[in-house]
Image (cartoon, helix red, strand yellow):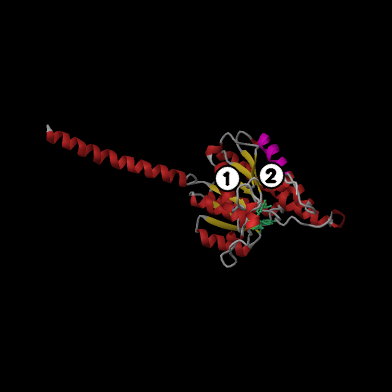
């Protein structure tokens, strides 16, 4: 009897414990690898916020295609993150570039689960409106807004097949401004509107959301030979209700959620990630 009980305990241990350990390991891995077999495109993924998004997606098992004009940074990202990352040089404001590049990407990845429209002219200051050249205004519109439209136009049939999703990277400058930033602000406001217009047009097959970052320090997401710690003062950090300036990881985590199945009920929304700055009332 004693022997039988002992054997039963041993059997229980030998059978059940490894199953529990394996299950626990799988659930940890399951979270970390929620994008195994998935493929994403990140425009402007060579450096800055886009590179942070690429890194996060790859860490969670995905393949990521970068579309960018910065060849040095794009090649460096391919080398740093391994063969699940591929770089394509293309200008998102040119329709032939976009069409050709997306065809090549789908041939490489054999599917498309998500598109992050992140590329942009990220330097907002253009001077006073009465001195602003039409060509400058037009270039902001072409890259920051038309680029997202063109990418969506040519990606949507692939995304519909996988019930994929799109994220447009806007900015808190869609909602508030510093002086002399009119072209940038107009394009970012346009992206917020483009998001809800696309969400109601493309659902239920494709979800479309917008992420509006505040101040994000990107110097640690440059190519490896140009990388340096951010030069930020105590005041830079402390003015934020969250107590610090943002990082590409902050935006990448939010994007990973929105691209995942956990966000299946979320579409047409704009998520502000700014450490609380747009909620802060200032009477200087
Ligand atoms: N960094 C911030 O504080 C901040 C805040 C709010 C919003 N954003 C937005 O986030 C996005 C990324 O910003 P970032 O700070 O990482 O800037 P960044 O300049 O480091 O990255 C932008 C990337 O887009 C690429 N790009 C520019 N024009 C292109 C084109 N025509 N075709 C293809 N690629 C092109 C650039 O080569 C670069 O790799 C931008 O849309 C920016 O407006 C940034």
- The part of the chain drawn in magenta is 190-201
Most foreground residue, 209 or 68: 209
Q: Position of residue 188 (x, y in %)?
A: 72, 47
Question: What residue sits 12% from the left and 34% below the top?
Answer: 2
Q: What element carries label 2?
A: loop
Instruction: Give the numbered dot on residue 280.
Output: 2
Q: Where is residue 237 in the image (x, y as percent from the top left)?
A: 63, 54
Q: Is residue 226 left or right of residue 9?
A: right
Determine if the magenta segment contains residue 197.
yes
Instruction: Give the numbered dot on residue 254.
Output: 1
Badge 1, how many Cα within 10 Å: few under 14, some, many 20+?
A: some
Count of picture labels: 2
Q: In this view, does 107 lie above or below 209?
A: below
Most foreground residue, 47 or 175: 175
**Principal SS element in the magenta part?**
helix
Q: What element carries label 1?
A: helix
């Amino acid at each position: 009897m004693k022997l039988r009980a002992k054997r039963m305990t041993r059997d229980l241990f030998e059978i059940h414990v490894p199953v529990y350990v394996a299950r626990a390991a799988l659930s940890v891995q399951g979270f970390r690898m929620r994008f195994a077999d998935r493929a994403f495109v990140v425009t402007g993924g060579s450096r800055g916020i886009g590179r942070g998004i690429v890194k996060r997606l790859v860490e969670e098992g995905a393949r990521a295609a970068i579309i960018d004009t910065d060849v040095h940074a794009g090649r460096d990202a391919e080398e740093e993150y391994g063969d699940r990352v591929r770089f394509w040089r293309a200008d998102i404001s040119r329709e032939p570039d976009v069409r050709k590049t997306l065809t090549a990407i789908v041939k490489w990845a054999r599917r498309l689960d998500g598109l992050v429209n992140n590329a942009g002219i990220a330097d907002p200051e253009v001077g006073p409106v009465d001195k602003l050249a039409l060509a400058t205004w037009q270039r902001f519109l072409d890259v920051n807004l038309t680029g997202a439209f063109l990418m969506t136009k040519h990606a949507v049939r692939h995304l519909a097949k996988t019930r994929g999703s799109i994220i447009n990277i806007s900015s808190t400058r869609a909602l508030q401004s510093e002086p002399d930033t009119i072209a940038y602000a107009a394009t970012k406001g346009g992206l917020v509107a483009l998001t809800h217009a696309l969400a109601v047009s493309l659902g239920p097959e494709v979800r479309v959301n917008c992420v509006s970052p505040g101040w994000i320090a990107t110097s640690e997401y440059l190519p490896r030979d140009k990388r340096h710690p951010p030069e930020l003062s105590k005041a830079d950090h402390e003015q934020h209700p969250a107590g610090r300036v943002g990082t590409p990881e902050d935006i990448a985590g939010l994007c990973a959620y929105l691209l995942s199945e956990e966000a299946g009920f979320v579409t047409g929304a704009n998520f502000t990630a700014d450490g609380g700055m747009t909620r802060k009332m200032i009477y200087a």
